[in-house]
Image (cartoon, rainbow, N blue to C red):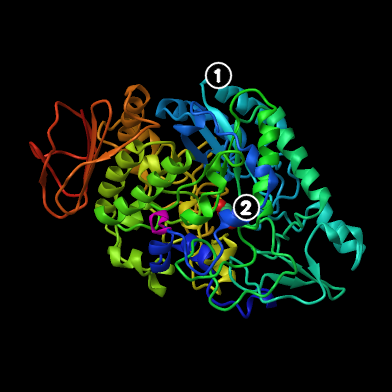
């Protein structure tokens, strides 16, 4: 471990929410909590100084992404066509039938660009190519064409806050030395300030000539200087490069951090990253005014292509922070992360939904719902633990040491899926959630890959547990993940948990035989078939997708809303069965009903 990590304290808030739900995240990340905070300028006030703000043009109400169900593919773990233990683009192509059969409208591909994988590919060495381990540009083109043939759009990840230390411009900057134009494209200083990396430890690393460079994430991810015209122009070329290849849009990584406050002032003690509570001060590297102008310029590029190309921004926000972005002339969408740290509670779910729903209505913006991604523990596990541990994770929980009732978590995750797909607007499904995969909590320390594990001085297990290769078929690892199921050589002493001749890049648990796609397709009651049925209904039902909701009066612990025409969602978060609300038919239930009673931890769609 490098010296820079020695003084690591707890990761800042954004990191803690990625690490697992925390008490802070629960309250602060709920956009419902976001009323303008006294004592700080509203971001709107700052943004209004921009003369271009008057040109705002609302996005088309009918844009495809407003109610799309997008499936997140984490390429390294989706499907492995060449049998090397890591997923690849031909693997995704070979499994498009699964996605078409599931019924999603689009896929978002996490980074597949050339990368040393210091942060799973979010350390990009070349923004306009495919890492050989994932295939070639021809494979990418074949995937886009294959997906289009199945009516599936493709969104790619763009990582504009930082690159890889292996990016040629960063290598040139190191070689050119202090004061050189090459260093201006990054953030080099003679002295560091007090900023901490989101992954833990200082945000500055010293190079051989004595200067320091800024990296808000890993030291292998130097931050770009967004006030440099070369950087602006380079990313415009990158957008066009992928738009020319037919992508339907971009997921923008760390979309709130690109610009840093002029002069790089120290973080004032007590300042907060992410959503703010009243009276809190923001860190000086989030939501800088220039961002809106940048995203407006990106939108112009997207609009110069046919079809509705979209952007979805990755950021944790409160309503004050979100409002200007949602005004309609820059970013198309912000991810709605509020449900991920929310414990299994009707009241707490409702508060988050209410806040986001109101914000979307008020701004005309689009905030697609999310229950899982490659940065947070899987929902089966989140919902299968004592929910007080979700509110306030202990040090043991951060290391994955807790009792998980997988059956309970699965029941709740299935009910949550019906909620997710019934909410107004778009939704994201993280690969494997349609299989009800739990977090893999027993990955041996020596095979963990997420830099957060070391950068937090091993106080947080990292995000590997939700990134384990998918199980497709068979009864033992690698569960059809590779091209062929290769049995482990006799007497193999390989990595614990590693399977097959090479092993998958992260080990799969031994008890996933019942969770494979093949096993679940054959089981009418499986989670996969629940998702398939829900997506099929959602495709045809006129009430689902974008639109309005009306909350229904319910007993405590129950959440219910109706949507016109003729649709009702009900989820019982409580411990006792409750009567189903008045209805004609049961369209779909996440678990067995008890006559006219909705059992605990069950969701239902009614007409
Ligand atoms: C957010 C991505 O989702 C996460 O995986 C990554 O580590 C950070 N951004 C840094 O790029």
Name the residue located 43 percent from the left edge and 63 percent from the top edge: 28
Q: Quadrant of the N terminus?
A: bottom right
Q: Position of residue 335 (x, y in %)?
A: 49, 46
Q: Position of residue 514 (x, y in %)?
A: 32, 42
Residue situated in front as seen by the camera: 422 or 266: 266
Looking at the image, tell me whether mark 1 or mark 2 is earlier in sequence order: 2
Q: Position of residue 449 (x, y in %)?
A: 57, 59
- What range of the chain is rendered magenta? 30-34
Q: How busy is the neighbourhood of tag 1: few (under 14 within 10 Å), some, or many (20 plus)?
A: few
The secondary structure that dominates the magenta segment is: helix
Residue holding disc 1? 149
Asked if 505 appears above or below 309 in the picture, the reply is: below
Image position of 309 (left or right of 349): right
Image position of 154 (left or right of 433): right
Name the residue located 44 percent from the left edge and 36 percent from the top edge: 426
Q: Position of residue 200 (x, y in %)?
A: 58, 70
Quadrant of the image occupied by residue 440: bottom left
Residue holding disc 2? 47
Asked if 266 appears above or below 478 in the picture, the reply is: below
Residue 318 magenta-drawn? no
Q: CA distance from mark 1 to mark 2?
A: 42 Å
Q: Closer to the observer: label 1 or label 2?
A: 2
Residue situated in front as seen by the camera: 144 or 449: 144
Q: Quadrant of the C terminus?
A: top left
Residue 31 magenta-drawn? yes
Image position of 433 (left or right of 600): right
Q: Is residue 510 visible?
A: no
Quadrant of the image occupied by residue 435: top left
Which type of secondary structure does the marked residue at label 2 adopt? helix
Which type of secondary structure does the marked residue at label 1 adopt? helix
Quadrant containing ligand 1 reads bottom right
């Amino acid at each position: 471990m490098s010296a820079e990590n020695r003084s690591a304290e707890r990761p800042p808030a954004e990191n803690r929410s990625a690490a697992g739900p925390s008490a802070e995240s629960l309250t602060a990340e709920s956009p419902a909590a976001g009323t303008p905070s006294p004592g700080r300028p509203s971001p709107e006030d700052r943004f209004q100084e921009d003369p271009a703000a008057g040109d705002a043009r609302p996005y088309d109400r009918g844009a495809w992404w407003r109610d799309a169900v997008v499936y997140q593919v984490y390429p390294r773990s989706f499907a492995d066509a060449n049998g090397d233990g890591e997923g690849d683009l031909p693997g995704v192509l070979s499994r498009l039938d699964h996605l078409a059969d599931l019924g999603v409208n689009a896929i978002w591909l996490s980074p597949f660009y050339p990368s040393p994988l210091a942060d799973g590919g979010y350390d990009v060495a070349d923004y306009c190519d495919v890492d050989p381990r994932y295939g070639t540009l021809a494979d990418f083109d074949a995937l886009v064409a294959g997906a289009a043939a199945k009516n599936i759009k493709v969104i790619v990840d763009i990582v504009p806050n930082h690159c890889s230390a292996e990016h040629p411009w960063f290598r040139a900057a190191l070689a050119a030395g202090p004061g050189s134009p090459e260093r201006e494209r990054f953030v080099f200083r003679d002295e560091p300030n007090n900023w901490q990396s989101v992954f833990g430890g200082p945000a500055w690393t010293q190079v051989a000539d004595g200067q320091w460079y800024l990296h808000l994430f890993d030291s292998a991810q130097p931050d770009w200087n967004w006030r440099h015209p070369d950087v602006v122009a380079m990313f415009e070329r990158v957008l066009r490069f992928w738009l020319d290849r037919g992508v339907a849009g971009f997921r923008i990584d760390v979309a709130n951090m690109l610009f840093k406050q002029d002069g790089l002032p120290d973080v004032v003690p007590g300042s907060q990253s992410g959503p703010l509570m009243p009276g809190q001060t923001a860190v000086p590297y989030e939501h800088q005014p220039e961002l809106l102008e940048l995203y407006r310029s990106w939108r112009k590029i997207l609009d110069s292509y046919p079809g509705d190309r979209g952007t979805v921004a990755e950021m944790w926000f409160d309503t004050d922070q979100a409002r200007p972005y949602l005004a309609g002339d820059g970013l198309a969408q912000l991810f709605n992360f509020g449900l991920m740290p929310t414990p299994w509670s009707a009241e707490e779910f409702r508060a988050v939904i209410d806040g986001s729903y109101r914000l979307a209505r008020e701004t005309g913006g689009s905030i697609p719902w999310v229950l899982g991604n490659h940065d947070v523990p899987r929902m089966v596990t989140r919902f299968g633990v004592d929910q007080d541990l979700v509110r306030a994770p202990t040090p043991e929980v951060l290391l994955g040491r807790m009792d998980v009732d997988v059956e309970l978590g699965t029941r709740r995750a299935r009910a949550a899926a019906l909620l997710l797909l019934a909410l107004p607007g778009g939704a994201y499904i993280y690969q494997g959630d349609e299989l009800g995969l739990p977090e893999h909590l027993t990955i041996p320390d020596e095979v963990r890959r997420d830099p957060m594990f070391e950068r937090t001085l091993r106080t947080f297990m990292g995000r590997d547990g939700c990134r384990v290769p998918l199980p497709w078929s068979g009864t033992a690892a690698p569960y059809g993940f590779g091209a062929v199921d290769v049995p482990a050589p006799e007497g193999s002493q390989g990595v614990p948990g590693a399977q097959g001749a090479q092993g998958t890049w992260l080990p799969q648990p031994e008890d996933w035989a019942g969770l494979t796609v093949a096993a679940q397709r054959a089981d009418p009651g499986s989670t996969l078939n629940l998702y398939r049925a829900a997506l099929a209904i959602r495709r045809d039902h006129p009430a689902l997708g974008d639109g309005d909701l009306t909350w229904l009066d319910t007993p405590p612990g129950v959440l219910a809303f109706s949507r016109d025409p003729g649709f009702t969602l009900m989820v019982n978060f409580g411990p006792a069965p409750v009567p189903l609300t008045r209805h004609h038919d049961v369209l779909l239930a996440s678990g067995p009903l008890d006559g006219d009673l909705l059992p605990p931890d069950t969701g239902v769609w009614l007409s």
